[in-house]
Image: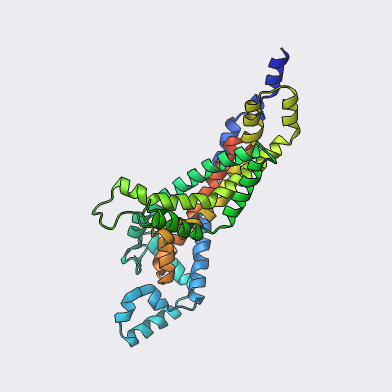
Amino acid sequence: MDRRRALTADRRPSERPEAAAGPGTGRGIARLVLGRVLLIPVLVALVTLVMFVLAQRAPFDPVLAALGDRALTMDGPTLEAMRAGMADTSAVQQWTTWWGNALQGDLGSSSSQRAPVLTVIVERLPWTLGLMGVSLALAVLLGVLVGAWAGTRPGSLVDRLTGGGLLALQAAPPFWLGLVAIWVLAVWWGWLPTGGATSPQATSVRPGDVLAHAVLPVLVLALSQLPWFGLVVRDATRDALAGSAVRGAWARGIPRQRLLRHHAVRPALLPLVTVLGVRVPELITGAVLVETVFSWPGIASATVESALRLDFALLAALTVLTTVIVVLGNLAADVAYRLVDPRVGQQDG
């Protein structure tokens, strides 16, 4: 009887009826989603306006940015006339003209890719989303496993080695990890291809070939994000084990595996969800570096190329796309947090 009473007292707050998700939670999530979705157009408009203002004041040739290599074949008087016309046009006028065309589906032509901007985005976006999605899932899975393994052994050799290793990995920039991975796994051992998404001799895209080329970029991008998830799970697990609830559960004779699962590891998932939302911009930055190192044909590498070659039409569209992805990523993290802990939505009203 005492054993049954102890197990009943061990129920987590999320398992109790008063903490269960109800209609109020659903309404709170709906308000949150609606508010963020309505915020996206305002945020995108402000970001693009700032982008046009900075572009007008940047020390590069606006004609070269607009025409690309075609400017090299034009005569001097024509180029000067175009520069004078662009100088007379304010950033706000350029911004309104660009939005007028964009709302009609015309994002302009990419001078670096020599194709319509919309075509470039449609062709390259799946490669980046696939790379980011698989890498994020792998980083979260490894972070939970490694963090929980070390956190449930506080002060042990495993805990110290894991913490030190994660901190060292956190300090390593993604491009350095990529170069080391290429040197060891591709050049030295010859296990994997050095870059690209398909073999040079391939005449079509084959899934097996793509998977072989994706191993290194996915692994490097996942390792660059792993320390953040592993450390937060490790620290949260250690804090939970040091709390009064765990000591009370030990005193009531709760089995070790049940105690670690319910009182240590599961509470650490809440800060993990918060870190997920914060890491979305850093995940995009890491994808830019990883795609550049491995010549991955995604949006991120096209961003670098458009900036280096003054491809403003493509850069403007990619800025809008990146802004939307960051907002939606943070929204997904906030929704997940409320689903994991409905009390957050109740406290927000």
Counting labels gives 0
Taking the image as shown, residue 126 lies to the left or right of residue 244, namely left
* Any part of residue 269 in sight: no
- Asked if 262 appears above or below 75 in the picture, the reply is above
Residue 94 picture location, percent across and down: 44, 71
- Asked if 5 appears above or below 27 in the picture, the reply is above
Taking the image as shown, residue 218 lies to the left or right of residue 122, namely right
Residue 95 picture location, percent across and down: 46, 68
Q: Which residue appears farthest toward the top when viewing the image? A: 1
Figure coloring: rainbow
Q: Which residue appears farthest toward the bottom when viewing the image? A: 77
* Any part of residue 265 in sight: yes
Q: Residue at x 75, y 27 (%)?
A: 248
Q: Which residue is more in the foreground, 227 or 46?
A: 227
| Position of the C terminus by quadrant | top right
| Position of the N terminus by quadrant | top right
Q: Residue at x 36, y 56 (%)?
A: 124
